[in-house]
Image (spheres, rainbow, N blue to C red):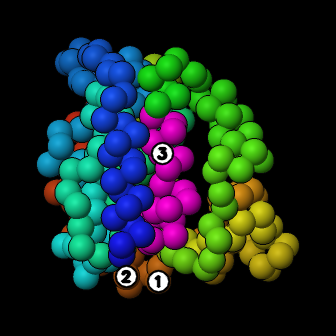
Amino acid sequence: MRGTRAVCSAFILMFAVSPSGSAQSAGAGGESRPRFAQSPQYPLLPRALEVELALSAAPSHLRDDATVWVLDKSGYAIARKGGNAFACVVSRRAGDLFPVCWDAEGTRSLLPLEFEDAQLRLSGKSGSEIEAIVMERFKSGQFHAPSRAGIAYMLSPMRYRIDEHGGVTRTTSNPHLMFYGPNLTDGDIGGVRGAFVFMNRVGPDGMMIVPVGQKERDAIVGESHSLVAQVEQAIGYQPSR
């Protein structure tokens, strides 16, 4: 807990002097929407909505005391400092928007990737450039793979892909648990995508994905209708008819 607070304090200092971006993005029907780093891929949400979306990644018993980070015009900042070891955020890396909640180890080792992505976006880097920079910083030791077993939660049923023109697509998001698996492959764990367990990617930030059961998924989806509607209106998602 003390370590988590120290990490949070360091992040606050790191981003307190960040430059700011201030542009508006044209959303559905020509309406103006706030965006980050002049990028239609990075919509800014109303603060209260972003907090609610971030917390939807976590199981209900962790939400009240979790730390919540939100994206504003200058980067990520703490919206609420919590009392447990978990930190929840709405990820936007390369236009892939989804909420995730990290345990203490993920907060230390992997949450900083979100902050780095935001600062590189502000500097004008593209998604492919950012991915190459992040991988190089893992190799150089600036970033570190998780050093112990741990868990991140992605229990929200919401995940969206936003292209460089601001077009929004809803992507499949089966609520799931993620266990740290640096550099593991599906062959290492007997994984098959969409089955009981599989790897999301191979690399220092690789995760073993374990979907929740159908009963749990139905309950999550059932209680998320209002939040889904608010988020989709805010990002300009237009379902196909």
Residue 216: image tag: 2
Label 1, label 2: how many angstroms apart (C-alpha)? Answer: 5 Å
Which secondary structure type mostly characterizes the magenta part of the structure? helix
Depth check, front residue: 125 or 236: 125
Q: Residues within 10 Å of mark 3 (few under 14, many from 20)?
A: some
Label 1 sits on a secondary structure element that is: loop
Q: Is residue 174 left or right of residue 180?
A: left
Q: Which residue is mark 3?
A: 114
Name the amino acid, label 2. Glu
Name the amino acid, label 3. Glu
Q: Which residues are magenta?
A: 102-118
Label 2 sits on a secondary structure element that is: helix
Q: Nearer the viewer, mark 3 or mark 2?
A: 3
Q: Which quarter shows the N terminus?
A: bottom left
Mark with earlier residue (1, 3): 3
Give me the residue at 65% from left, 47% from top.
142
Q: Are marks 1 and 2 in contact (CB under 8 Å)?
A: yes
- List x then y, in percent, for residue 238: 32, 35
Position above or below: 146 against 74: below
Q: Residues within 10 Å of mark 2 (few under 14, many from 20)?
A: some
Give me the residue at 39% from left, 50% from top.
10
Q: Are marks 1 and 3 in contact (CB under 8 Å)?
A: no
Q: Is residue 105 left or right of residue 232?
A: right
Name the amino acid, label 1. Gly
**Residue 63 in view in this figure:** no
Label 3, label 2: how many angstroms apart (C-alpha)? Answer: 28 Å
The part of the image, by quadrant, that contains residue 179 is bottom right
**Residue 143 in view in this figure:** yes
- List x then y, in percent, for residue 124: 52, 17
Q: Which residue is mark 1?
A: 213
Label 3 sits on a secondary structure element that is: helix
